[in-house]
Every structure is written in structure tokens, then in C-alpha cells.
Amino acid sequence: MGIVLQDPDDQLFSPTVDDVALGPLHMGIPEAEIHGRVERALASAGMAGFERRRPHRLSLGQRKRVAIATVLSMNPSVLVLDEPSAGLDPRGRRGLIRRLLELPQTMLVPTHDMRLVAEVFPRVVVMDEGRIVADRPTDAILADDALLEAYGLELP
């Protein structure tokens, strides 16, 4: 399982995008394999060629994609992405959606972005104060006006 934090600045701390190699390195992956993992992860996140860039000089959307790449480099079967669209402009949001749709991993995504939910996820679990209040296909959740109103969710 790989976790991508809401704020990429809490996840990226190296002076360059080389952060992507840290997970596999600490997992004991042979160095010869790490380079390929980093390249694939950055390509999957739309950040190929950014290995030597400084994270603080990247846009928020680019930093979020690098944070995703740091997790993808470890080949998790499950991704947890905390509010992945928070703070993104429309272009960054669209790019994120395209990338998420291409990923093969199972994703758990705590979010209030119902448009993201509608476009990417086939199933929704609505939680309130730590308990599950609904677990249905996305279309059924989005069609339930009473449920959306009761839990402060808005249609996309």
C-alpha cells in the first residue's frame, strides 16, 4: 500500500525530484533496478525528465504528480491518495484525472471533490464521523439527493 499525502510538501524533502528513488532504495531494491523504477514512475505520473528539478520550483500540480511517483516507484497494489485534487487549477485537475484513469492500482481516495469521484471512481463509500453511511456505485450515490444533502456533498 502506498500513501500520497494531501500536501506534497509534506512528502517531498530532497533537494531534487530524486525523492522518487528513496522508497525503493530503503526497500532494499538493487540499485540497478531502481533507475528503471524511477523512470517508469515519473512517466506514469507525467513527470518524465524532471529528475533533476527542484521540487520548490515546481507548480503544486507538478509536486503532487512527483509525490504520486514516489509511491508508484515502490509498485504498491493499493494507492491511498488524500484529497488529490485539492488546490489544483482546472488544467492540473484534468491532468490528474487523466493520470488516475491510467493507473492499474486499486485506489482509496478520501475526497470532497465529487466531480473527481464521478469521473474516476466506480464506487463510493460515504463516511460520517468515522462510520460508513453509504456504500454504493457512484451513479447511485450521485442520484441520491437526500444523502448528498444530509452529508454536505455537492453534485459535480
Image (spheres, rainbow, N blue to C red):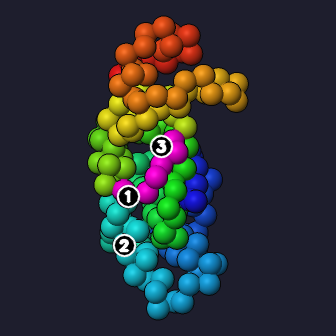
Q: Earlier in the sequence, mark 2 or mark 1?
A: 2
Q: Badge 3, how many Cα within 10 Å: few under 14, some, many 20+?
A: many
Query: Residue 75 or 10: which is nearer the viewer?
Result: 75
Query: Residue 57 or 121: which is nearer the viewer?
Result: 121
Magenta-highlighted residues? 103-109
Q: Name the residue type under label 1.
A: Pro
Q: Badge 1, how many Cα within 10 Å: few under 14, some, many 20+?
A: few
How far, Cα to Cα, is label 3 from label 2?
20 Å
- Look at the image and tell me whether residue 52 can be seen: no
Kindly identify which residue carries mark 1: 104
Mark in front: 1 vs 3 = 1
**Residue placed at 36% from the left, 56% from the top?**
103
Kindly identify which residue carries mark 3: 84
**Residue placed at 48% from the left, 43% from the top?**
84
Name above or below for residue 109 compared with residue 105. Answer: above
Q: Name the residue type under label 3.
A: Pro
- Look at the image and tell me whether residue 27 can be seen: yes
Query: Residue 9 or 122: which is nearer the viewer?
Result: 122
- Looking at the image, residue 129 sits to the left or right of residue 38; the answer is right
Assign a secondary structure to mark 1: loop
Kindly identify which residue carries mark 2: 40
